[in-house]
Image: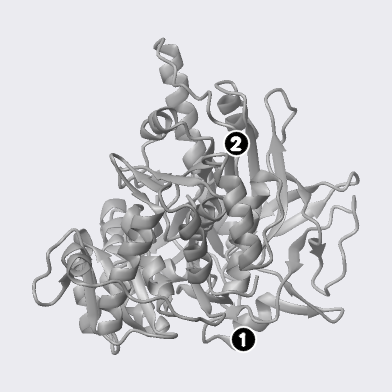
Amino acid sequence: MRENFATVLETVADVRADRTAITHGDRSRTWRELDERASRLAAYLASRDIGTEDRVAIAQYNGIEYLESVFAVLKLRAIPVNVNYRYQAEEMRHLFDDAQVSAAIFDASLYQRVTRAQRGSGRLHTLIEVGGDGDGVTAGYEPVIRAAGPHPRTERGVDHWLMYTGGTTGRPKGVLVTHEWLFAVAGGNGFGLLGEPPPDSLAALRSVTQRLTERGDTIVCLPAPPLMHATGMYTSLGALLACGRVVYLTGRSYDADELARTVAAQRVDTVSIVGDVFALPLADALDRAAAAGRPYDLSSLRRVLSVGVTWSADVKRRLLAHGDFVCRDVVAASEGGPFAVCETHRGDDVVTSRFLLMPGARVIDEAGRDVEPGSGQVGVLAAPADDEIGYLGDLAKTAETFRVLGGRRWVVPGDLASIETDGSIVFRGRDNRVINTGGEKVFAEEVEQVILEHPGVRDALVVGLPDQRFGHRVTAVVARESGAELTTDALVGYVASRLADYKKPRTVVFVDSVQRSPSGKADLRWAAAVAGGLTQSAD
């Protein structure tokens, strides 16, 4: 649908005015309240000269205010920018500069990092603090909304949407798309669960919203991943578009018992996770509760969705022992897809990382030819892409990831796979220098560069080791300077002071020397073998 996404949300809000849109602990918002509060926040931003194509950073935890902030920014035809709340000040500053951010709406707990990042940023002039009253440097979120009048609705064009991903260059990359692309992704996530095609006009959206609203909440969705990542955001928007209600956990770190309790209390039918990093603790929590004679009530649960990270067969079986729902495992990326899907029901014979290609998706070799089924050849996944999607400010990386093959544009983000003789695919993981750990992408060379700056380090390589829960663990193979008494804890602490916590090594191996090729290139096979055979945990 070629419509502005704010206009799309306003259309849904008008029909579902008194229906609950969001639940967060003991708080909730109806669609009317969501729309009005977003309009008041938009009015304040407009008074600060935020308008069409301006960028507004959102550094918040999951909750009502996150979606209100996104809605408010879209109302002004501005662009929300997702910020990883784990970033340190320097990482935030880089993102603010890369996105050319003019305003930021952030959680009060991030005050020191955001204000430090602002001091080094050229354009950022407006700070709004969620959970604070403002101090002159910042404005308080609730005071702003109370004081402002609603911003009037306006005619809008098809604007841009920006989603930052960890990327493959050591710095976050902004995937820039149009609202038409956003609607297709969110609409597919929501209406696809109902077996309905997404509407193709505002009139059709209004009609289907009226029809589905008569059924109540078609979906009650609990996205467990952070909204700062594509999975959490697109799952939320999809549920809202399809006349559903979204429910968020209150904890700021993942608590599997809270998730299970919330499913029962809110009668959740759809849970969104990211592979074993979420699923394994949930299986453990369900097993403990059942063994103690107080099993969680999962009778409302119909589906558990996972995107982007390995979800092992054993963990799926353990989950399905506690309920009659489907485990839907999808290979997709912030840049596009979905590429492949696996659906598992109770009693199915399931194999880890075995999928079916989605319609239109392919596995191709380096020359862009289709990989032959049963050949054993490992290729890369590709899916059709529109002409406008690309990386913000990076034409070279855009050309690398979005390739023209046979006169058509394809997204090829580097997901490796082979095709079996029966047409199923085996997912082989990400590009070998990107470590996907717990749903976060970590570029190995970025971590290496920080480690090499430590005065006690002579050389280092960083690789990812398989991990049952997190998919992979960031692992450092380090050669000390002669006479240096560098310890694992000291090195990990040094990295954690410079980079987000999830980027620090979880395992460190000290060696006499790091093996490289004659040209100085990293010998990653050697590093992985050494790390796998001799590890020292940094947890």
The colour scheme used here is one colour
Position of 298 compared to 363: left or right?
left
Position of 92 relative to 218 (above/below): below
Number of numbered discs visible in the structure rendering: 2
Q: Is residue 268 left or right of residue 351?
A: left
Q: Position of residue 39 (x, y in %)?
A: 34, 69
Residue 139: image quadrant is bottom left
Secondary structure of the residue carrying numbered label 1: helix
Say what amino acid the circle numbered 2 marks. Answer: Arg
How much space separates mark 2 and mark 1, taking CA atoms? 39 Å
Which of the two marks, 2 or 1, is nearer to us in this view? 2
Q: Which mark is residue 396?
A: 1
Instruction: Examine the rendered structure and indicate whether residue 375 appears above or below residue 114.
Output: above
Tell me whether circle 2 and circle 1 mark residues in contact (CB < 8 Å).
no
Quadrant placement of the N terminus: bottom right
Q: Relative to residue 408, is residue 163 depicted above or below?
A: above
* Residue for badge 2: 303
Which quadrant of the structure image shows residue 4?
A: bottom right
The residue positioned 72% from the left and 32% from the top of the image is 350
396 or 81: nearer the viewer: 81
Left or right: 175 with respect to 47? right
N-terminal label among 2 and 1:
2
Percent across and percent down for residue 121 are 28, 85
Task: Say which quarter of the image contains residue 122.
Answer: bottom left
Q: Quadrant of the C terminus?
A: top left
The amino acid at mark 1 is Ala
Question: Badge 2: how crowded within 10 Å, few (<14), some, or many (20+)?
Answer: many
Residue at 44% across, 57% down? 476
340 or 525, which lies in front? 340
Identified at 48% across, 70% down, the residue is 6
**Relative to 102, 431 lies left or right:** right
